Image (cartoon, rainbow, N blue to C red):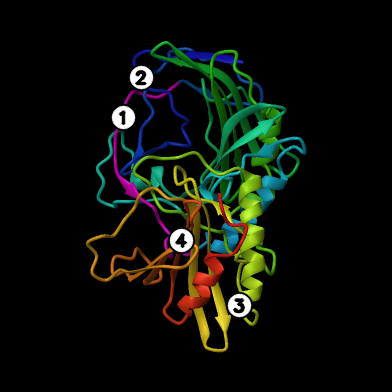
Amino acid sequence: MRLDIRRSGVWIDAVVVAAIVTAGCVAAGITHDSQPEVEDIPGCDVVVPDGETFSFLTGSYPGTYDNPDYPWLTAEKASAMSESLVRSLPADVEVQFASPSNSLVFQPIQIYSKNAELSGGMTVEDISGDSTASGVVDRAGVAAPLRVSAEAWDDAIPPCTEGSVDERTTLPDGTVVDVLDAVSEYDGVSTHRRTATAYFPDTTVHARTSNEGAEAELPLEADELRDIVSNPELRVSARVPEGTKPARADCGSPREFPVPPLPRDVVERIGSALQTQWETTFPNTSTDVAVGDLMPGRSGSGSACNAVVLTTSRGTAQLNVEISLEDNKDWPDDPDAVRSVIPDGTVVTRRSDLRTIGTEPPEWLSVLRPSNTVVQLRFDDTIAVDSLVELATAPGLDL
């Protein structure tokens, strides 16, 4: 294990340089001092010292799949890569139950301003272009975040950099993989991290897992990270199996005060109840995803949700479903909201929403059950409201 001390700068992987903030993303450059002498590293023909010190900040915003600037990353490609990534984990390692963006699903590539001014000779192309899958993995009670990124790449394999590589391996197919097992320290706080980077002819794949503490345990060994990043199905050119469904996106409404996520058994229970009622209320309707296949809502939402496209004799329509505990949202001054109370005390509120985001359906329905469980639905106006109320008042949906 390598020990790095960084008191005057911030340690960061050379490949992964993005940090999430509330308003978007911030990319941070490498900040460390060059060293005049270097040690030999197994498997490395050339070892170079750390580079010069520089840093920068720049903003970005979430991209979308099927971006013409990155034609290799379709929603189906992201799904195929994500499934292959999970399969490549050791059999006794589990991915913690979470929303897609936190359960090792490769996300759309972040978009940076092409006019961004970066220091140290860096360009936007140097910090962009990677799709990242993040999540928390657990092995026998030892849990840690895992982050895996893939990027189209056709440059020469770089020399080994001191402090970033413990060992370089060339696999039988010619793939070069670097691994690192190290401890870094900043402001008196130590972090144990393991990383691996694979260089394919057309792709780089990078993985990192870490925990706070110099002696902190990690659920994945360095050689297991090597196996993960060298998976050829993570290459940008890897074929997408026929019939692969698009990667699912996060759902769930933001809350002013974040709440804990729902447990898996609760999400599965209410999902089963929702599906049973759906098949009764909408017997001749097909969907691209089972309505009851609920996911945990985005971080802090404390909900279970789904977004489906349904097909009937009248055509297709979109339906978004979210189930959570009421957080005191109210619309008392909204003249477009229509509210009614059914005999069991359930409060039904409907309005047409002109403040939709992206491709959200324009109609909104809230069904507040006596248990304080609220079922919210966004839908196209081709779906009968009475049928949706029947769906939202089904038995078994209470939290």
Name the kind of residue labelled 2 in the image.
Gly
Q: How far is mark 1 from mark 3, CA to CA? A: 56 Å
CA distance separating discs 3 and 2: 59 Å
The amino acid type, in three-letter code, at marker 4 is Gly
Tell me the magenta residue range.
50-70
| Alpha carbon separation for disc pair 2 and 1 | 9 Å
Label 1 vs 3, first from the N-terminus: 1
User: Is tag 3's residue or tag 4's residue first in the polypeptide sequence?
Assistant: 3
Q: Amino acid at mark 3?
A: Phe
* Residue 105, image x, y percentages: 57, 50
Q: Earlier in the sequence, mark 2 or mark 4?
A: 2
Name the amino acid, label 1. Ser
Residue drawn at x 59%, y 45% is 104
Query: How many neighbours does mark 4 have within 10 angstroms: few (below 14), some (14-19), or many (20 or more)?
Result: few
Q: Give the spatial CA distance, label 4 vs label 1.
A: 58 Å
| Residue occupied by mark 1 | 55
Q: Which numbered disc covers residue 9?
A: 2
Marks 1 and 2: in contact by CB < 8 Å? yes
Residue position marked by numbered label 3 in the rendering: 282
